[in-house]
Image (cartoon, rainbow, N blue to C red):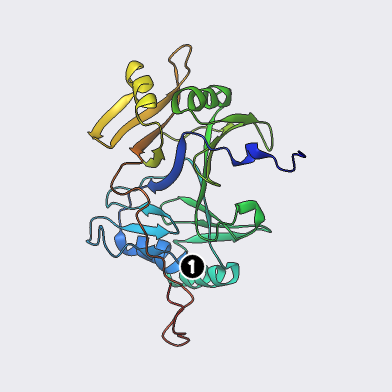
Amino acid sequence: MERRFDRSVEDLGNIGAFEHVNVTVPDQRLATLFYVDSLGLTRDPYLKTGLDNMWVNIGRNQFHLPTNKPQVVRGVIGIVVPDRTALVKRLERLHKSEGGRFDFREFDNYVDATCPWGNRIRCHFPESRNGGMTLGLKYLEFTVPIGTADGIARFYRQVMRTPASVSDDRGRHAHVPVGIGQYFNFRETADPIPEYDGHHVQVYVADFSGPYRELLGKGLISEESDQHQYRFEDLVDLETGAPLFTIEHEVRSMRHPMFMRPLVNRNPAQDNRNYQPGHDA
């Protein structure tokens, strides 16, 4: 029988989903203006509805924004949003009203928006290269020291059991699949790397105990959260134990009560002046 399809394209690693990125913010008002009013995302109506934390839905994913001194991801957060024209209009309005505390730049295939505390959000738009995603967290691209990409990829392959690889496309980097159409990139740079400030990412894994045993044996478990979750911070050279990069991973099993929790996403184009019934979501 003729083989007409590349079946390997459908393979997934052990990391089944990248759900949220958590950065603390000092001002919930400004965070609301940037993430909700400007990017067009949706504050979760059910959880974290007070003044000390905000969960912001983006498709099946979230930003978690607790109140504290600002944290900044060392790199770029890549998202997909539905409408470039509408996004730019919202960013222009916000940039003008807030006196430049927010910034953005337009490029051919994306728009870079920077929050008041320095987090860079790279906004992409629905197209075939985004795997059908119309709204969601697409990737995180971290800047890492020269010479660490190979060790980082090896760590994810052997400890987290996901098919990480190394590429020289646009500079040497480790490419780590973390869900359907989602990935982490660890791109090498000679520039100074800012000190780690405690921000974290959260992933769901199918084999929960296997990576746990590997991490525990290497002394890398940083938090025994509960039955469904643990955390680790350091990516290390598996031969020497030397740290390569630090980013806290909140690791959840697929038995976690919040796995595949339905998230509410509004249509930011809706307004009382142009309201259309049936188009709220």
> What kind of residue is marked 1?
His
**Residue 57 seen by the camera:** yes
Residue pushed farthest top?
Answer: 240
Residue pushed farthest bottom?
Answer: 273
Closer to us: 222 or 148: 222
Residue pushed farthest front?
Answer: 1
Residue 227 location, x and y as percent?
A: 24, 35
Residue located beneath label 1 in the image: 95
Using the rendered view, name the quadrant where residue 34 is placed: bottom left
Q: Eyeballing the image, is 151 above or below 141?
A: above
Using the rendered view, name the quadrant where residue 126 is placed: bottom right
Residue lying at 54% horizontally and 68% vertically, measured from the top left? 87
Q: Eyeballing the image, is 126 above or below 194?
A: below
Residue lying at 39% horizontally and 65% vertically, measured from the top left? 42
Residue 266 location, x and y as percent?
A: 42, 70
Using the rendered view, name the quadrant where residue 82 is placed: bottom right
What is the secondary structure assignment of the residue under circle 1? helix
Q: Eyeballing the image, is 44 above or below 227?
A: below
Residue 275 location, x and y as percent?
A: 45, 85
Residue 46 location, x and y as percent?
A: 26, 62
Residue pushed farthest right?
Answer: 2
Residue lying at 64% horizontally and 59% vertically, measured from the top left? 127
Closer to us: 123 or 30: 123
Within 10 Å of the Cα at label 1, are there few (<14), some (14-19), or many (20+) other Cα atoms?
some
185 vs 66, left or right, is right
**Residue 99 seen by the camera:** no
Instruction: Name the quadrant of the C terminus.
Output: bottom left
Q: How many marks?
A: 1
Closer to us: 122 or 206: 206
